[in-house]
Amino acid sequence: MKIDMKDVLKRSRPLLGLIILSVIVSLISPDFLTVSNILNVMRQTSINAVIAAGMTFVILTGGIDLSVGSILALCGAIAATMISSGFGVAATVFATLALGILLGVLAGIAITKGKIQPFIATLVAMTLLRGATLVHTDGKPISTGYDAAADAFAWFGTGYVFGIPVPVILMIVVFLVSHYVLKHTRFGRYVYAIGGNEEASRLSGVRVDRIKIAVYALCGLVSAIAGIILTSRLSSAQPTAGAGYELDAIAAVVLGGTSLAGGVGTIFGTFTGALIIGILNNALNLLNVSSYYQMIAKGAVILIAVLMDRKK
């Protein structure tokens, strides 16, 4: 079988970008390639990467989800409230994940049954859920407390397994499961088919609405996981948590080679894109670049990602 080198280079573009960026940063800052810094980069990347995994499913269907940051904030606030109120870790995690799924399902129903554009539906959800978080927290952080349950809950954000941070392990598990679902299940094939041609998929007997609702539910689930990681790491829920995370997730997905038009992309490409953003943030911190300039750099990366997508 003849190998199309042009196609190989096109598919490898995110990985090549990651390698080039890593080499440049390692030359500029000798602290970059230390084990402690690499683990720090992975831990900092984990939250955005987990959200981006769910966003990949949504974008592959030709949709978008702007509510992920608000879902993270509300789920984190509920988790902190439950832990501080004496609930066990298992019950808290179960309730938090269930809430994330429910919020995703509601967004999916609004899009499929209400015939609302994904951008508008999730924009409304983002505003409503952010407001709900502010009402629940009264605009103040909610501490998880100092008892045994709070210490056990903190393991999700600060714990280690064989020297590897738990958030990194959770991130890897999310991506491995996502890869399997996309590449080796009927559901994954339907996700690609809907993004490629929704009407043709519908005429072929695919239950498009059901798949879309499931995709947004999945995105809500991983946002809840990210909320648990962030809240447990800080031992508190911040009312403004997750602000802007939707942009980072979308940027990671597009940088990883997934088309905003849907139907094209891979989960490992998204992982690469998340690492690019994580390494960029880490490099700017190591170089003591002002946070204001970091925002400009991140905006430039998102612009480049969109321009690359349009050239496909």
Image (spheres, rainbow, N blue to C red):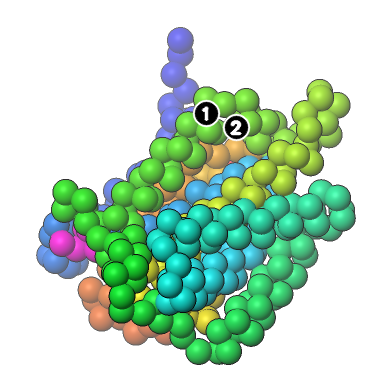
Quickly name the residue at label 1.
183
Q: Residue flagged by tag 2: what amino acid is it?
A: Gly
- The structure residue drawn at horizontal position 81% and vertical position 25%, both measured from the top left corner, is 205
What count of labels does the image hold? 2
Residue 29 lies, in percent from the top left, at 17, 67
Q: Which mark is residue 188?
A: 2
Secondary structure beneath dot 2 equals helix
> Would residue 208 be found to the left or right of residue 276 on screen?
right
Task: Determine which quarter of the picture holds residue 111.
Answer: bottom right
Query: Circles 2 and 1: CB distance less than 8 Å?
Result: yes
Q: Amino acid at mark 1?
A: Lys
Label 1: how many residues lie within 10 Å, few (<14), some (14-19) or many (20+)? Answer: some
Q: Does the magenta stretch mainly form a helix, a strand or a loop?
A: helix
Where is the C terminus found, in terms of image quarters?
A: top right
Using the numbered discs, state the Cα–Cα distance from disc 2 to disc 1 in whole angstroms: 6 Å
Residue 172 inside the magenta-drawn segment: no
Give the residues in magenta. 36-42
SS of the residue under disc 1: helix
Neighbour tally class for label 2: few under 14, some 14-19, many 20 plus, Cα within 10 Å: some
